[in-house]
Amino acid sequence: MFKLLFYVLFLMCINMGPAVADIKEIERALIVEQANRLNWGNEQLFIDSLIRNVPFEALKKSKLSAPEKGERLFLLARALELGVTTPRDHVQSYAFYRLAALAGNTNAQMRLSKLFGYDNPVGLAYLREAAERGNTKAQNSLSKFLLDQGNSPKNNFAKSKAYNWLLGAAKADDVSAQYKLGHYLLIGENFAKDQAEGIKWLDRAARNGHRQAQYDLSQVYLIGQGVEKNITLGEKHLTDAAYNSHAMAQFQLGQLLSNDKIEEKISWYLDATRKKHPEAPLALARLYVEGNGVKKSNVIAFMWAVLAAERGSQDAKKMVMKYSKKYNEKQKSRILYELSYLKADNFNDALNLDFEQFGIE
């Protein structure tokens, strides 16, 4: 009966957003109940099998620091929430999250903030507490929440606070915060435009492996946005982004490469196509029309164009209209059958398709 009551109260917390006083009463009752179940005098706080390979000593007797206790409580809460080697129990999970949060565990504070929602004062309080304790994800989320409040004059203070939170996370080497801060400052979104400062943070994020930062930085130097134009440096950042699986960078790098590097050009187009870039298949189609680095083939060009058209390329749709007139229904049926190779990403097989055996050129 007790458990059912608290389950109902828990659902109220999550779905109905009760007043802060109500939540505190619920929390207090849950903590008292949970403390009774923990039996602090026992040598073993939880059965070893509850979370595989993570034994839990009696926390009160142990010499663990508060952060270590908080981490163990957080792990248990996650196990109960997700049903990892133990039946799911959202009420118990909530109680352990709360205990972990009281021990200063910022991951627990973040989870509680999401359970309550940022529009709930309790959820927002948890988020702020985690941010103040240095959790960079919390700082990122709090900054975004403040920025989402709108552009009215009364929100100018919120924007200044958002900048401070984002700057703090960026200085703590949070790569997502570094990118966001650099992007906002570069283009003057949310904060006053400061291209030099924006480029500095984009560079920090790029060095930390953020692929969008690498791509954005490549464009900065290729076009000279806020800096002196530098093709060599721009191509260096573009190559970094391409190797980091950025589809647009792969496509653009393929375009920049000269025809004496045709194999590399084709390789980047293929990589971009695998990443669902809409124009990359069209670029391959044009190579087959010209016979540039590949055996000239209108039918394989047609196949690549169909794939690009399906991804929304308007130029590809025009090419499909033009070439579809060359083939009868039987031939089209065969071509579309072979197109399944492209859709399954079997691009190496597609490159070697021989349509002459079907009487199609």
Image: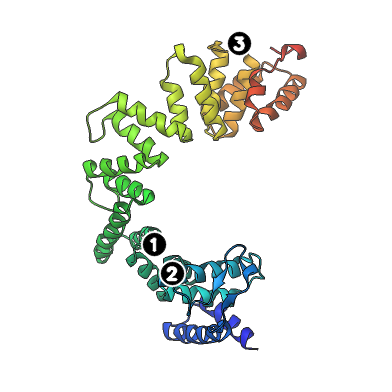
Q: Give how far across and how far down residue 190 sits, in percent.
A: 29, 53
CA gap, disc 2 and disc 3: 60 Å
Q: Report whether residue 117 is seen.
A: no
Which badge, 2 or 1, is on the more N-terminal residue? 2
Circle 3: element type:
loop
Q: Nearer the viewer, residue 121 or 240?
A: 240
Q: What's the residue type where badge 1 is placed?
A: Ala
Which badge, 1 or 3, is on the more N-terminal residue? 1
Q: Which disc is residue 295 wearing?
A: 3
CA gap, disc 1 and disc 3: 55 Å
Q: Give how far across and how far down residue 126 sits, in percent.
A: 40, 71
Return the residue at label 2. 109
User: How dense is the environment of label 2, judged by Cα within 10 Å: few (below 14), some, or many (20 and up)?
Assistant: many
Q: Report whether residue 22 is seen.
A: yes
Quadrant for the N terminus in the image:
bottom right
Q: Determine contact: label 2, label 1, CB under 8 Å.
A: yes
Q: Nearer the viewer, residue 134 or 121?
A: 134
Decide: is 177 above or below 26. above
Q: Give how far across and how far down residue 265 sits, in percent.
A: 48, 20
Return the residue at label 1. 138
